[in-house]
Image (spheres, helix red, strand yellow):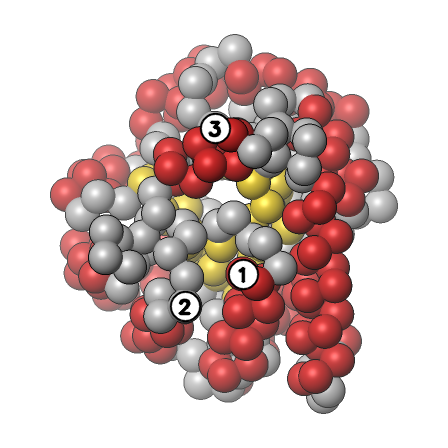
Amino acid sequence: MNNGPETYPEMFKRVKEKSEGAFIPFVVAGDPDLETSLLVVKEMVNAGADALEIGFPFSDPVADGPTIQAADVRALKSGMTTSKGFEFIRHIREFTDIPIGLLVYYNLIYQRGIGQFYKEAQKNGVNGILIADLPPEEASSAIEFSKKFGISQIFMVAQTTSNSRLSHISQMAEGFIYVVAVKGVTGARSDLERDTLDLIHRVRKHTDLPICVGFGISKTDHIKKVLKAGSNGAIVASVLVELIEKYQEDRRVMLMEIRRLCLALKKATRGCGP
């Protein structure tokens, strides 16, 4: 990593040149333990992940459904802390340069001190931070420190986001815009709502930033649909975390199944880039 980690603009340019969309898998740091979750990330990277989204476990993850909540509980029971979360990122940086984004809740940042949190994030190779429960109207300090430490401050938009608020968020965000695919919390869904595709079109009118769709993206068909609608990437979480939960007593099978699914999800991005 002589030149530092790949940036989000570099990553999106790379996949676009190959007529692909970005495949961004999610994992909770330390689920079900630090060693296993590192092996899971290695499988994701080897299977073609273009970037990573890492969740720092929190006791009250209000944006998350039962699957991610259970993962947070497993990680916390294994002894994960914010310090160990940064250690986790540091270990990931030993084997990949692809962008790493954190999904965190503000209490973890507040407890550490916002300046210290962003400083440690930058030191350990984090590219972006999304604070799930921090509204844009209260994000001035986060934006200040994100700029100071060269970290992209990422924001979510949903179907309930007004056009005026969407314009405001688009001016504040860096890296990409996170489009929430469903009304509600995280969790694998069987079908993709038509409203999601309409939202992608609406967001595109307000920003030139890349768009990535998450929450409920669980099938290859979902990925193809959001990419063909104009998204630049797909973030896949709960369906992968479900495999960790299902096979937590058999790590070999867990890693094999994670790799199998990630290969299929990445393959779905090919030929579907905007």
Residues 266 and 197: in front is: 266
The amino acid beneath tag 1 is: Val
Drawn side of residue 97 relative to residue 223, left or right = left
- Residue labelled with disc 3: 210
The CA span between labels 1 and 2 is: 9 Å
Residue found at x 43% / y 18%: 208
**How far across and down, in percent of the image, does residue 38 sit?**
50, 75
Question: Vertically, is 227 above or below 119?
Answer: above
Which is more toward the observer, 38 or 172? 38
Q: Are marks 1 and 3 in contact (CB under 8 Å)?
A: no
Instruction: Say if mark 1 contacts mark 2, CB within 8 Å.
Output: yes
Q: Amino acid at mark 2?
A: Phe
Left or right placement of residue 9 versus residue 203 in this view: left
Q: What is the C-alpha distance between the residues marked 1 and 3?
A: 21 Å
Residue in the picture at 23% in, 51% down: 3
**Label 2, label 3: how many angstroms apart (C-alpha)?**
26 Å
Name the residue tied to disc 2: 95
